[in-house]
Amino acid sequence: MKTRQIVIGLISMAVFFVIFVIPFILVLLTASKTPAEAASVDFTLPERWVFWENLVETVQTRDYQLLLAYWNSSVITVGAIVGLVIFGAMVGYVLQRRDTKLTRGLFFMVLAGLMIPPAVVPTIWLLQGINLFKTLHGMVLIQIAYGLGFTVLLYRSFIATIPRDLDEAAIIDGGTPLQIFFRVILPLLKPVTVTIIVVQAIGIFNDFTHPLYYLPGAENVTVQLTLYNFQSQFVSQINLLFMNILLITIPPLLVFIFFNRQIVAGMTSGAVKG
Amino acid sequence: MADVVLTDLRKSFGGLEVIKGVDLHIESGEFCVFVGPSGCGKSTLLRMISGLEDVSSGRIEIGGKDVTRAEPKDRGIAMVFQSYALYPHLTVRENIGFGLSLARRPKAEIKEKVDAVARTLQLEDYLDRKPKALSGGQRQRVAIGRSIVRDPSVFLFDEPLSNLDAALRAQMRIELTDLHAKLGTTMIYVTHDQVEAMTMADKIVVLNGGRIEQVGAPMELYDRPATPFVAGFIGSPKMNLLEGEAARKMGAREVYGIRPEHLVLSEGDGRWAGTVRHVERLGADTIVHLESREVGPLLARVEGHREFRLGQEVTASPAEGRAVLF
Amino acid sequence: MQRRSPYPYWFLLPAGTIFFVLFLVPTIASFYFSLTYWDPFEARFAGFENYVQFFSEPYLARGVMNTLIFALLTSGLKTVLGLLLAVLLTSGMLGQGLMRSVVFFPVLVSTIGVGLLFQELMHPTEGAINVALSWVGIDGPGWLTNPSLALFSVALVDVWRGVGLATLIYIAGLATISPDYYEAARIDGATRIQQFWRVTVPLVRPATTTVVILSLIGGLRLFDLIWAMTRGGPGFSSDVLASTIYKQYQAGFWGLSTAGNVILFLVIAVVILPLSLWFNRKEVDL
């Protein structure tokens, strides 16, 4: 490495530190402060570290609401992902393998679905009509509907790299369409499935807008909405608010550490082909 | 064991007809090779027999049963693909037993059959490996094993050797011929390589532009090609084909053909005078490229090693009774 | 008779049903409901009244303008900064792997979390940003309390949060450019700046397409960050279409809210469709 690259590297790291790291350090510091100290979010170290006390208090707030929120968010995330992976892969498979007017039209709709903003109030009206408003399974189905575009797009382009010979070998081996899909194709989709699971899980876990509309009610609270509740309740308790931010950032952070490569693959999938 | 009968078989993609009426009878137990240049329809024809491709019109019978509209699995066929199409996520054992497992056969039966096939193909040591840990030849054998375990009445091979290097290809040709001798099952084999066709086939079917040019035993095609296309396609180096005036002078209506080994080269008098342009010394024989003033380029093949100089003037004469006239 | 395809259409049914019922039906219904006076109790046909109101009421029209300003600003900044950062982070300098992770991490953090965090950091007197500015003698503005500044402050935070994704996409795009081009350009005597404009920028265009379109769609639809930081305030100064839709829904004006939804849909279509056609046409010329 040339001196130049080291110097530029050091300067850049300093700038990056100020812009991207300090805000997170402030979260950590503020979450460790007493309410009085936390009233101004600045660069001082806490006089008294009350990190653990704040954590306990945040979790206990509103009768352990955060735990309920974690449970609800997990149910929604897991349920939606199972549906997205299986149903999305089936769609991507047929759309890629079968080139007809119908599949081309459907693919266009998938692309349109990536762009069109959901019509929220009519969706609420419809969810009420089929008794899915304010229900976790309704939310799961909504997240599936909204996540399908991205999922199908990724699966479709990955399936294009799987030779058709494999399907045909399985046809000759006597496989039914379902057997071929579940025993030959789906196992081969593992790399892209991991990417989809990771990217969608983060998206659904972090989703605030849709639970806000479709899942009101204290018993249905999701992790992002706990913050929203805190904001009104703890105007002067910024320490707890920041503790809560910290607590709900842990799952994405873990995913980021363990699945960095898959996240990058998923999020940049459009860059090469355009 | 079954024979295969194709009757006026046709196939169109969109408006384009790619198989233009094929009639063919492949005898039970025969090793039949479809050969032809790329795009001649040979693979499509094989895929129609397998059931992977729909038939536009005509009829396919296997073992006396009309299977034109039958599902692939109900035709009693097995197929070896050019890419081998081994399931990358399964071990060799699972690959070979996959069809049986789909049919929900008992585990013991699957194991027994897979083991028997593995013995036949000397794959016992590799049963727990994944395909990517195998060499090209081993993968080829697994693909064959997967077809044997189905106990088919007809084997279909779609250019199975084209991904192998030359030495391995020669070895696999022998192994496949041995396998055919051992199993005695009808085999249909597609290739663009006329050497494979000549060395392995009981019967060769030469296809061109979606039609059959000629059907026959290898030497029949070699000695008595029915069309100039077959004459030019079968045999290496290629047969010399003279057209127009030069052909008519030799008594042919349109095309006069003479194989390189049937041209006698001499320094004295002969039929065509020419200049040596290029010499390929192969050891066992020598191939001489001549430029004749009268008929243009000619290829001659001479046994053993004979010295020719570039630019040397020689004459070439067709051996008696060896020419093919069209 | 056609034999059954190994790729049966019924594979499309589970996903298709969910997508149709929960996405397409409401989208189609929104066109009707946007033409009604609609509240939790009834829907009466109103013609284009909602649309007229949307463009005549200043506080609603402001939202449409703000949406466009916000999307263009954030998309432009993300594209330019993303490309520059990507070039910087592929130059082989010290610590570039670490910095790639650092710049990308905010993408994964909850938007609401980021919004609330910056709401505190941007506090006019006690926030960290103005505290830091005061050290160098600058009297920091009321980032979120000044009506003419609030939208831009939120836009800055959106860029802070989203530039990592743009950078990542550009890094992937840069990786597809063969080093041969740079070597050829150097042999032709191109300076670094010339290499950037004549080689990098044209050859990284597929990535630019992705970044511009993704960030425009994201910017036009943005709701959560605005809601967390300003709730459209002060007044209506930082309202965008998405926040207006929510406010009108909460106020019980469902028809008006749905009209906002349809307008958002049309705005996105009008901005994105010509743009992607234009990008695609240029792609062919390459």
Image: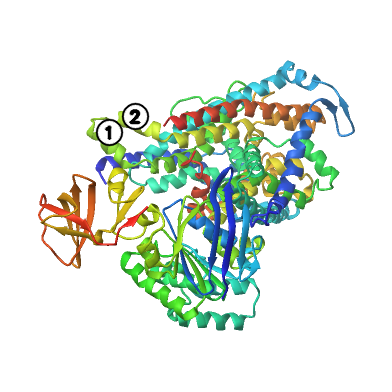
Side of A132 relative to A174 (left or right): right
| Chain assignment, label 2 | C
Between residues B61 and C227, which one lies in front from this camera angle? B61
Residue A146 numbered mark, or none: none
Image vertical order of residue A232 relative to residue A71, above or below: above
What x and y, as percent, mark residue C82?
A: 45, 35
Secondary structure under the numbered disc 2 in the rendered image: helix
* Residue type highlighted by circle 1: Ala
Three-letter residue code for mark 2: Arg
Q: Quick one: A59 or C43, which is closer to the camera?
A: C43
Quadrant of the image occupied by residue B265: bottom left
Residue sitting at the far top: C56
Q: Residue visible at 41% across and 72% down?
A: B138
Give how far across and how far down residue C242 sits, in percent: 68, 31
| Count of all numbered marks drawn on residues in the image | 2
Q: Is residue B200 left or right of residue A145?
A: left
Image coords of residue C4 (percent x, y): 68, 57
Task: Name the one closer to the observer, C153 or A215.
Answer: A215
Is there CB contact under 8 Å for labels 2 and 1? yes
Element type at mark 1: helix
Whole-angstrom CA distance, mark 2 to mark 1, is 9 Å
Task: Give the camera-side residue of B61 and A272.
Answer: B61
- Residue that numbered label 2 is attached to: C198
Badge 1: residue crowd in 10 Å (few <14, some 14–19, many ≥20): some
Display coloring: rainbow
In the depicted structure, whether residue C36 falls above or below residue A1: above
Badge 2 or badge 1: first in the primary sequence: 1
Q: Are marks 2 and 1 on the same chain?
A: yes
Q: Which x, y percent locates residue C146?
A: 61, 23
Mark 1 sits on what residue?
C185
Vertical arrangement, residue C69 with respect to residue B292, above or below: above
